[in-house]
Image: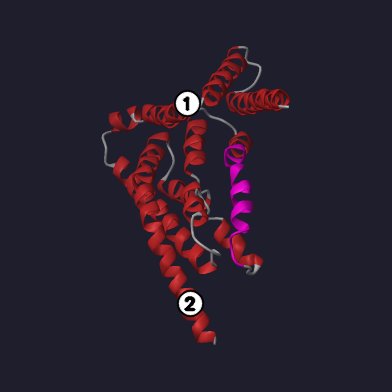
Amino acid sequence: MAELAMNKSQSEFRKGLQSGISISIGYIPVALTFGLLAKTTGLSFSETVLMSFVVFAGASQYISLSLLSLGTGIFEIILTTFIVNIRHFLMSSALNERCEDDDLVHKAVYSFGITDESFSVAAMNEGKVTTGYMYGLNLIGYFSWGIATGFGYLLGASLPQTLQESMTIALYAMFIGLLVPSMKKSVKVVFLAALAACFNTIFTLTETLSTGWAIVAATLLSSVIVELIEGMKNKQRRKDDE
């Protein structure tokens, strides 16, 4: 019986690995770029790789690089990272309903590896999602991200110093590249981005807040205002339908 359970667990683990191959392939170029940019930002090799293995959150890591280059304090960086990753509470809660019952320790371990991509793959899985499947799915993405980060850093170290310094511009270009597709799909995102930019500009020019706190405050304020407006619109629509 125990051997049968072990074989099933190994089979689910292999199934998770197979499902995660496409995710890991997608992570590699992004992780390589992160490692390269981390080198130009001034991080050491160990700091760069450690960030990828400990944080394991692409958007937050890129934002952290931007904040570090601006000399932002640690607390502001941690708070900004928390705000960016707060969606993981919702993803983990939703996925927990699909996962098989298991020890809390196992769930805590594999939940660390949940990303937007692994959540999407696991959520589309038919039936109950097993612990072995989640370990396989998350591990292949986790190690490909961390290892590719290290290769990206080494690649950046081999570039001429002038080119390394100019690569910091690519960080802002990447943020624009991530934002524009979302802006094309939703007017709400356009309004949110414009409002956040206005708040950040006001806070910076008036020197009301430091650079890090200006970004945090602008993000929170714009998000709250947009959601309040959205809520009022939905409430009005319901009244009109009645």
Q: Which residue is mark 2?
A: 8
Q: Taking 186 as reference, is 45 above or below it?
A: below
Residue at disc 2, secondary structure = helix
State the residue at coordinates (61%, 39%).
Answer: 78
Which picture quadrant has residue 13? Answer: bottom left
Q: In the displayed image of the protein, which residue is found farthest to the front? A: 242
**Image-based side of 127 in relation to 75, left or right:** left
Boundaries of the magenta span: 81-100
Give the percent coordinates (x, y) of residue 130.
54, 67
Q: In the displayed image of the protein, which residue is found farthest to the top? A: 206
Disc with the residue nearer the chain's start (2 vs 1): 2
Q: How many marks?
A: 2
Residue at disc 1, secondary structure = helix
**Image-based side of 107 in relation to 136, left or right:** right
Name the kind of residue labelled 2 in the image: Lys
Q: Which residue is mark 1?
A: 183
State the residue at coordinates (64%, 21%).
Answer: 209
Of residues 70 and 180, the one nearer the viewer is: 180
**Image-based side of 127 in relation to 218, left or right:** left
Is residue 63 highlighted in magenta?
A: no
